[in-house]
Image (tube, rainbow, N blue to C red):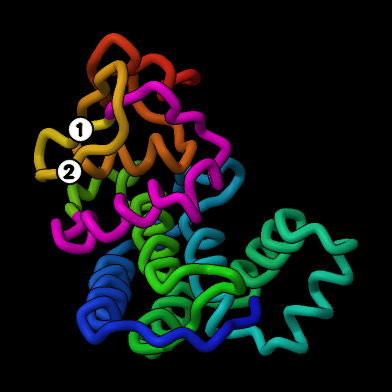
Amino acid sequence: MPSQTFHQPNSLAQAIAAERRDLADVLAGLDAGDWDAATLCAGWRVREVVAHLTMPFRYTQERYGLELAKSGGDFTAMSDRCAKEDAAALSPAELTAVLRDNAANPWVPPGGQPEAPLTHDVIHGLDFTVPLGLGRQVPGDRMLLVLDAVTSPAALGRFGVDLAGLKLAADDLDWSYGSGDRVTGAAQDLLLAIAGRRLDAGSLHGPAAARLLPNA
C-alpha cells in the first residue's frame, strides 16, 4: 500500500522498530506447523497475517495501484487476495527477513496518524501470538501508545466497534477511556476487543463486557 511522508518523534520511531524486531524474533522461532495455524483474522493463517504485515514494505505505489484496480477498488478484497497469493509465494524465512529488514521503514498508511504503523504492527502481531498461546506481552509503553491511538477522535469507530457509554479500564496498565458502564481487562484484550477481534468469554469483566464479546 502506498505511504505518505510523516515526521515521527524519535521515541515513536524507536517503538515501531523495536516492535518489528521483536515480532521477527518470534517468527524466527516458529515451526512449520505454527505458520499454518489459524489466527484472529478470519480465514488467515499465520503466513497470511505476516504477508499482510509486510505488504507495505514489498509493494511499490505502482503495484499497489494495480492490485487495487484488479480488485475493483475494494481494499479489503485486495488485501485478502494479496495476502493469500504472497503467503503461497514467499517462505516463512523470506517473510521474517522482510519484517526484520524493514524495522526502521518510515511507512505510514495514507491518511494515517504517526502512530498508525505501530497500531498496525501491534494488532496484527497479537492476531497470531495470542492464538498460538505464546504468552508474549507487548511492552507497556507501546501498548499505551496504541490504546490512545485507537481511541483518538481520528480513529474511533474505524474497526466498527461501538464504545459509546462504556468506560474501558486496563487492569495491568494505567489506562482508561470513556465514561459509563465499566469494562475491565488486560490491556491487550481491550485492544483486541476495540479492534473487533473475537475473545474468550472470560477475557473482559464488568456489566457491559458482553457488548465487546458478542461472539464469545
**Residue 78 on the magenta segment:** no
Picture quarter with the N terminus: bottom right
Picture quarter with the C terminus: top left
**Disc 1 residue type (three-letter):** Ala
**Residue 140 on the magenta segment:** yes
Circle on res. 169:
1
* Crowdedness near tag 1: few (<14), some (14–19) or many (≥20) residues, C-alpha within 10 Å: many
Residue stretch rendered in magenta on the structure: 138-167
Circle on res. 175:
2
Q: Who is closer to the viewer here, 114 or 126?
A: 114
* Crowdedness near tag 2: few (<14), some (14–19) or many (≥20) residues, C-alpha within 10 Å: some
| Residue pictured at 57% horizontal, 41% vertical | 42
For numbered disc 2, what is the local secondary structure?
loop
Q: Say left or right for 147 vs 151.
A: left
Residue 108 at x, y percent in the picture? 50, 77
**Disc 2 residue type (three-letter):** Trp
Give residue 171's quadrant in the image.
top left
| Residue pictured at 9% horizontal, 40% vertical | 172
